[in-house]
Image: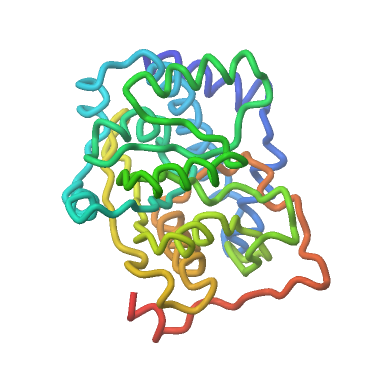
Amino acid sequence: MYLLADILYFIAYYVVRYRRKVTRRNLTNSYPHMGDTELVKLERAYYRHMSDLLIEAIVNLYASPKWIMKHYRIVNRELVNSYYNKGQSVVLMSAHYNNWEYMITSLNFQLLHHGVGVGKPLNDKALATYVTRRRSRYGTEIVDQTNVRETMTYYHQHQVPVAYMMLSDQSPSNEHKSYWTTFMNQETPFLFGAEHFARKYNMPVLYYEVKKVRRGYYEVTFSKLCDTPNDTPLYTVTALYVQRLKATIDSAPQYWLWSHNRWKRHRPDDMPLHQALDSDITNKH
């Protein structure tokens, strides 16, 4: 199937030149120390990976649990399961880094918690309905971010331990309801929803990193961001997430979604720019 990905890479990069200007601008602004040769190398590596992701996203719509678990291995699921054993729901924060489609589909059978994936719906309603049906065929519940409040209220009232998967690197639609900080050398807004709901129900927050072991094979590792959000200053969870995400991207930048127009919004004058975490907060968490 990766022969198709190779063909797709050639078409996307050399023929259609899909979002090449956006990608190059994002890379240049994020890594100003890189020279042109290094940027082109990184750019090509990204497009190769993006082509793999598209093919894997299609495969994911039809793959069996056995196939997915072979290609998408969770290294330390026991960390998440330990919260289930205590009857606690958790927030799982990650990003559009490496393969996220396998996690959406397998969330409900990879972990003991009931799996809920929270995100933005596709613009094409017919396609969105089909993709949602395929993603949820093994029990993962797909919830639009505008409806997550009702979902969380229901499961909290019925004491159902839920793992809420949130890809929190998406660009917020409202500049005034965002957490603004310096990220990848640029002023960047982040969604605050994960921390908001974690605080509302005092849910532990975990970060998970997806590493590409080799083509088509991934490993997922969970780590704690915060066990008791209500015991921390406001924005601590989001700041910790941003810090961890940057470290993940810097370790292998070709695997992040660079063709997304992530920095299309500008910080309003009345919105504060939050600084990076100091070492004391980092060490505590």
In the figure, residue 72 lies in which quadrant?
top left
Residue 108 lies left or right of residue 27; in this view the side is left
Q: Residue at x 27, y 25 (%)?
A: 68
Which quarter of the figure has residue 190?
bottom right
Residue 81 visible in this rendered orientation of the protein: yes
| Residue 132 in the image, given as x and y percentages of width and height | 49, 22
Quadrant where the C terminus lies? Answer: bottom left
| Quadrant of image for the N terminus | top left
Q: Position of residue 5 (x, y in %)?
A: 45, 19
Q: Nearer the viewer, residue 142 or 183?
A: 142
In the image as oriented, which residue stretches furthest toward the bottom? 280
Q: Quadrant of residue 181?
A: bottom right
What residue lies at 58% left-to-right and 39% top-to-bottom? 147
Q: Residue at 68% of width from left, 74% of height from top?
A: 273
Residue 254 in sight in this render:
no
Q: Residue furthest front?
A: 157
> Does 206 sit left or right of 275 as displayed?
left
Q: Residue at x 75, y 50 (%)?
A: 264
Above/below status of 186 relative to 67? below
In the displayed structure image, the side of residue 10 where residue 21 appears, left or right: right
Q: Position of residue 110 (x, y in %)?
A: 24, 35
Q: Position of residue 33 (x, y in %)?
A: 58, 64
Q: How many numbered discs, if any?
A: 0
Q: Residue furthest right?
A: 269
78 displayed left or right of 54: left
Q: Nearer the viewer, residue 219 or 88?
A: 88
Classify 90 as above or below 19: below
